[in-house]
Amino acid sequence: MLWQSDEVTEILQMIEEEHLDIRTVTMGVSLRSLAGPDIEGMADRVYHHIHKVASALVPTINEVQEELGVPVTNKRLSVTPVSLVAEATGADDYTPIAQAMDRVAADVGVDYIGGFSALVEKGATPGDEVLIRSIPKALACTERVCSSVNVATTRAGINMNAILLMGEQIKALAENTADQGGLGCAKLVVFSNIPDDNPFIAGAMHGVGEAELVLNVGVSGPGVVNSALRRLVERNPNCDLATMAELIKRTAFKVTRAGELVGREVARRLGGAARFGVVDLSLAPTPAIGDSVGEILQAMGLEHAGAPGSTAALALLTDAVKKGGLMASSSVGGLSGAFIPVSEDHAMIEAARCGALSIEKLEAMSAVCSVGLDMVAIPGDTPAETISAIIADEISIGVVNNKTTAVRILPIPGKKAGESWEWGGLLGTAQVQAVNPFGCAGFVRHGGRVPAPLISMRN
């Protein structure tokens, strides 16, 4: 990868002034060789295998960020979906494996480990059901373990039985972590069309088609895009939207180049033990002022995220980010677009607080961006069936549009619409949003499978 001197100068300016960071370097680790008939034995093998292959990860990343001057905010791990390798144990609870994952994550110094996961888009095996029913206990008793469940794909349709079960598990997990405001639910994502190579938590997993060890990089950069757009509008208040799109595209190109540089250098220094995988281009906000996707929408002329025009503005942003990233690298993957996690973006928090942003508007916006209903807080007394129906609505958007969508929804025990809960750090502030009060239990309790849409017939 050849760099021009002006590119280096621009990258350094982005780091120093505009919140540019590499949001995560995530090592994917295959657990496929560790299956066995004893749950405790498997948990022990999981710990020792991950420790062996990942012990050098954090020191190597720290060396690279110090030498290149590019900050890496998070160091993470992901593993093969646990339900696939734990089923051979015959256990009725996979919590011991989650606990082993948590211990090794702490010991090797990573922030989170993803992959306590199941793939049930067309149906669930007994092991899949055990994993899903283990989630409320496993995520409540661990700090770093994250979970994802894929309940639908465009090719398979939607597993409504799994969605109904996930609504119940989310409620149970919220109650199990009630003293932390239902924090466990922030570590659980329900997907359609889950990618195999997503480096972002909580949905990271190591797909079954991946190599033994892979490094995937998640770049960030909403602060860079926001600053660039505001400078453009200052110079030319009447600039058109195509001009804005071109600027975003060029900015995404530079951010992607920085991410690939870091990922390839970490892989090289690990001595070939892990191959470089992908750069995920997703604009991932933080609660810091200036580092916000919501602020980007405001820079484009909207009073608040959620105002009329928000879906169109987000579509422009996501498309331009993808185009710029694809020009910069042939190794683009993961989710790649723009995240709209409500509690993690101060402008989105404010939009929810003032009533500009509803769950229904978030659904519409998710049709054109990377994920879906992300870090959305709802009243703690919301029925499990309603949570399942909200999941079903969002998952349907992904299935029909042949894209990834996801739900990370947080019932906050004891809280009602309009109230808030402060988590702090990257998780920010949960502004509890109103949920449509009308009944839906009769629909979701039909269960079964929603057939794949016509778009699935592509052979």
Image: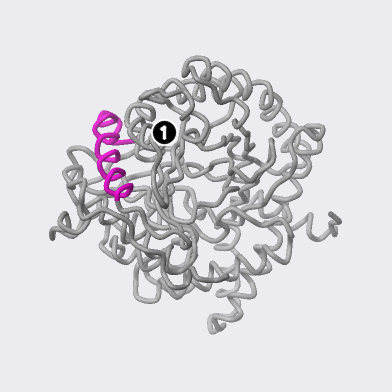
| Quadrant including the C terminus | bottom right
Residue sitting nearer the eye, 87 or 260: 87
Kindly give the residue lying farthest to the left in the view shown. Answer: 438
Q: Quadrant of residue 157?
A: bottom left
- In the rendered image, is residue 230 in sight? yes
Magenta residues, dominant SS class: helix
Residue sitting nearer the eye, 244 or 377: 377
Q: Is residue 362 left or right of residue 401?
A: left
Q: Position of residue 114 (x, y in %)?
A: 51, 36
Q: Is residue 212 above or below residue 370?
A: above
> Label 1 amino acid?
Gly
Disc 1 secondary structure class: helix
Residue sitting nearer the eye, 302 or 147: 147
- In the rendered image, is residue 299 in sight? no
Determine if the magenta segment contains residue 362: no
Q: Is residue 322 left or right of residue 345?
A: right
Residue sitting nearer the eye, 274 or 153: 153
Residue receiving disc 1: 127
| Quadrant including the N terminus | bottom right
Residue drawn at x 55%, y 83% as measured from the top left: 240
Q: Disc count in the image?
A: 1
Q: Quadrant of residue 183?
A: top left
Q: Is residue 7 left or right of residue 211?
A: right
Residue drawn at x 30%, y 58% as measured from the top left: 352
Q: Position of residue 189 (x, y in %)?
A: 41, 45
Q: Quadrant of residue 250?
A: bottom right
Q: Position of residue 266 (x, y in %)?
A: 75, 38
Residue drawn at x 58%, y 75% as measured from the top left: 244
**Magenta segment:** 161-183
Determine if the magenta segment contains residue 178: yes
Q: Position of residue 295 (x, y in %)?
A: 46, 62
Other residues around mark 1 within 10 Å, as few (<14) / some (14–19) / many (≥20): many
